[in-house]
Image (tube, rainbow, N blue to C red):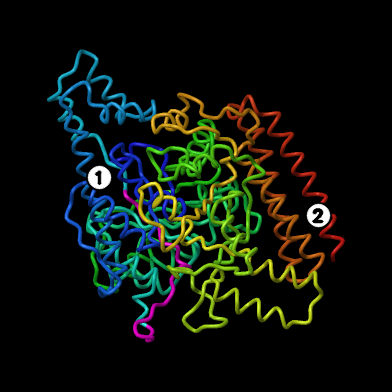
């Protein structure tokens, strides 16, 4: 059955979409939950078991394989409860069935389902006919899950390192694999060969004779080359990538994995032009691997979807991306943080997000993963972090240890945001022969790390009145730059009306086009890198930045041709877009002069 909607809700933080399927799946909307934090997952299972009056027995950390079992149990609860909600929605018995009306209303106007329903009810309402029609035509949203492949810490029992399958990402994968869900696993943050190989232990990831795969694989990528490499690696294991989800490197929320200057438009064009090559080459490898493993060979071609996400904010942009690049879906992330019917954000953070402007949204070095991280200025987790620094006790207690990946001081690993790591690192810096200015710089580099693996889940706990005594009540939040242009809380119907052009939820008139905004972010990023190079010269880095600048130049030329060629697109903005491109190009030329001066 084809998807009801042409948008999906990506994973946001650790907790903001942890229960989104319970809120939106009944309306045919796909959403993604994070599997980083099994402690939060277990707490949410308790919350919903009580809410739905279901029996609950805690899975403590004394239980063997507790991480995987917690995840399986929570996913099964989501599966059962969303199906029940969806079945109730389809069981229409009166004109006052709000959920059913909402489902139909929220569909895009071009939806064949919506058109069929309107035709069915032209001559009056027959509830038995509608019920039969609904059971045949309505589809539930997918309960997809996300694993960050980098967060794959080894675990210990009685100081003995456990086998690799008990690593964090491996256990999360097992938890999903053993659940009842028929949905997708979104793999993000790069390639993890050991984790990818481990997937081949679970039958649900393999196609049946008709090509049906119960648990599909989605790769979140930011360029074609990376997608091709990972797709081929998995195909050689007999595993099919059902979807490549292209995310903007910088114009997104959460961690920002900057590309080498490859912009969203040119990347999407490359996927569009090479989709059949990607599909055919990986499918050939897949069939060979399935034959070798004596597994079922699908009789038909397997399906391959191309989707995108990152910074999209208007119906015009959404429609253009879908049509121009022949996409299957477009992800809408940050705006959904202002939709309480879809995501879990506490009242104080919600208020901060509503008021946030461009200056409040920035790329920070606060993530212990060592990757740039989108941050909201004044988030309560960072306020608490500064208070600890001011008290002379930088770092936090690190109760969860999900990002305890640094092995400088401890074989079992420490999180760089932890008090233990920062204490040891600052002692090390203290004895170095450095200038006062250099020492301050090194100290700030250590203490700017924040305990995001706790902070990104706290909002959900506060919203559900769950105790935060052990972890603290500081909230980390990671919206993309697009958040600056949304300034009010929106209903679920309201946001779908906005996405499909039936209404407009943006009051500001100065929001830049999605392509221009991303370009601007990349040029700022390049300038920052050039400035770093002036104080810490490196020949290899200079070559890299020269290539980066060249890729941006190619992207600008592509957009210039695109905007001129597509007469029917962005009509009211055409001159504004071309002028904005010219402005960014001039900035790039000046940076080019600086790069030449360093050679």
Q: Is residue 564 left or right of residue 154?
A: right
Q: Secondary structure at mark 1?
A: helix
Position above or below: 148 against 482: below
Whether residue 213 is visible to the viewer of this picture, yes or no, is no
Whether residue 324 is visible to the viewer of this picture, yes or no, is yes
Q: Is residue 77 left or right of residue 5?
A: left
Quadrant assignment, res 289: bottom left
| Point 55% across, 66% down: residue | 368
The residue wearing badge 1 is 82
Disc nearer the start of the sequence (1/2) = 1
What's drawn in magenta, residue-wise?
A: 143-161
Give the image location of residue 591, x and y in percent.
Answer: 80, 53
Position above or below: 317 against 68: above
Image quarter (top left, top right, bottom left or bottom right) of the C terminus: bottom right
Q: Nearer the viewer, residue 287 or 17?
A: 17
Image quarter (top left, top right, bottom left or bottom right) of the N terminus: top left
The residue wearing badge 2 is 592
Q: Count numbered badges in the picture.
A: 2
Quadrant assignment, res 5: top left
Quadrant assignment, res 131: top left
């Amino acid at each position: 059955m084809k998807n009801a909607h042409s948008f999906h809700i990506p994973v946001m933080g650790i907790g903001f979409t942890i229960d989104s399927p319970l809120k939106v799946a009944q309306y045919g909307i796909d959403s993604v939950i994070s599997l980083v934090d099994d402690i939060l997952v277990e707490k949410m299972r308790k919350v919903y078991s009580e809410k739905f009056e279901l029996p609950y027995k805690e899975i403590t950390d004394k239980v063997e394989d507790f991480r995987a079992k917690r995840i399986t149990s929570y996913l099964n609860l989501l599966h059962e409860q969303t199906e029940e909600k969806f079945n109730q929605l389809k069981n229409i018995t009166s004109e006052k069935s709000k959920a059913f009306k909402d489902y139909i209303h929220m569909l895009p106007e071009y939806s064949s389902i919506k058109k069929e329903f309107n035709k069915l009810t032209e001559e009056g309402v027959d509830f038995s006919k509608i019920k039969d029609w609904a059971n045949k035509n309505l589809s539930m949203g997918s309960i997809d899950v996300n694993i960050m492949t980098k967060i794959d810490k080894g675990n210990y029992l009685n100081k003995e390192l456990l086998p690799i399958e008990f690593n964090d990402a491996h256990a999360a994968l097992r938890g999903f694999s053993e659940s009842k869900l028929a949905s997708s696993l979104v793999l993000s943050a790069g390639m993890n060969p050991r984790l990818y190989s481990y997937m081949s232990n679970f039958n649900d990831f393999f196609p049946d004779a008709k090509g049906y795969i119960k648990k599909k694989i989605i790769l979140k990528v930011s360029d074609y080359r990376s997608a091709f490499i990972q797709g081929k690696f998995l195909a050689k294991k007999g595993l099919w990538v059902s979807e490549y989800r292209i995310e903007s490197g910088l114009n997104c929320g959460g961690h920002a994995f900057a590309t080498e200057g490859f912009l969203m438009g040119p990347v999407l064009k490359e996927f569009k032009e090479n989709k059949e090559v990607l599909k055919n080459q990986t499918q050939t490898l897949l069939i060979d691997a399935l034959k070798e493993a004596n597994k079922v060979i699908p009789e038909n071609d397997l399906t391959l979807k191309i989707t995108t996400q990152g910074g999209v904010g208007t119906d015009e942009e959404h429609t253009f991306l879908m049509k121009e690049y022949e996409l299957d879906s477009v992800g809408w992330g940050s705006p959904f943080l202002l939709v309480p019917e879809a995501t879990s954000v506490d009242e104080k953070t919600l208020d901060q997000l509503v008021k946030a402007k461009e200056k409040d949204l920035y790329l920070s070095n606060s993530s212990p993963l060592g990757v740039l991280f989108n941050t909201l200025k004044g988030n309560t987790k960072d306020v608490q972090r500064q208070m600890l620094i001011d008290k002379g006790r930088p770092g936090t207690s690190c109760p969860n240890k999900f990002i305890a990946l640094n092995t400088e001081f401890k074989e079992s690993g420490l999180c760089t945001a932890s008090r233990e790591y920062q204490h040891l690192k600052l002692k090390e810096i203290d004895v170095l022969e450095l200038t006062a200015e250099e020492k301050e710089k090194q100290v700030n580099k250590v203490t700017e790390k924040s305990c995001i693996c706790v902070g990104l889940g706290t909002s959900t706990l506060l919203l559900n009145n769950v105790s935060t005594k052990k972890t603290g009540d500081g909230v980390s939040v990671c919206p993309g730059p697009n958040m600056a242009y949304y300034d009010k809380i929106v209903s679920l119907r309201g946001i779908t009306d906005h996405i499909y052009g039936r209404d407009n939820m943006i009051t500001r008139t100065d929001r830049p086009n999605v392509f221009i905004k991303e370009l601007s972010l990349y040029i700022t990023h390049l300038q920052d890198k050039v400035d770093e190079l002036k104080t810490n010269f490196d020949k290899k880095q200079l070559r890299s930045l020269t290539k980066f600048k060249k890729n941006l130049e190619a992207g600008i030329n592509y957009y210039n041709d695109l905007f001129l060629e597509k007469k029917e697109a962005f009509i009211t903005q055409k001159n504004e877009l071309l002028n904005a491109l010219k402005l960014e190009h001039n900035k790039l030329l000046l940076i080019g002069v600086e790069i030449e001066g360093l050679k």
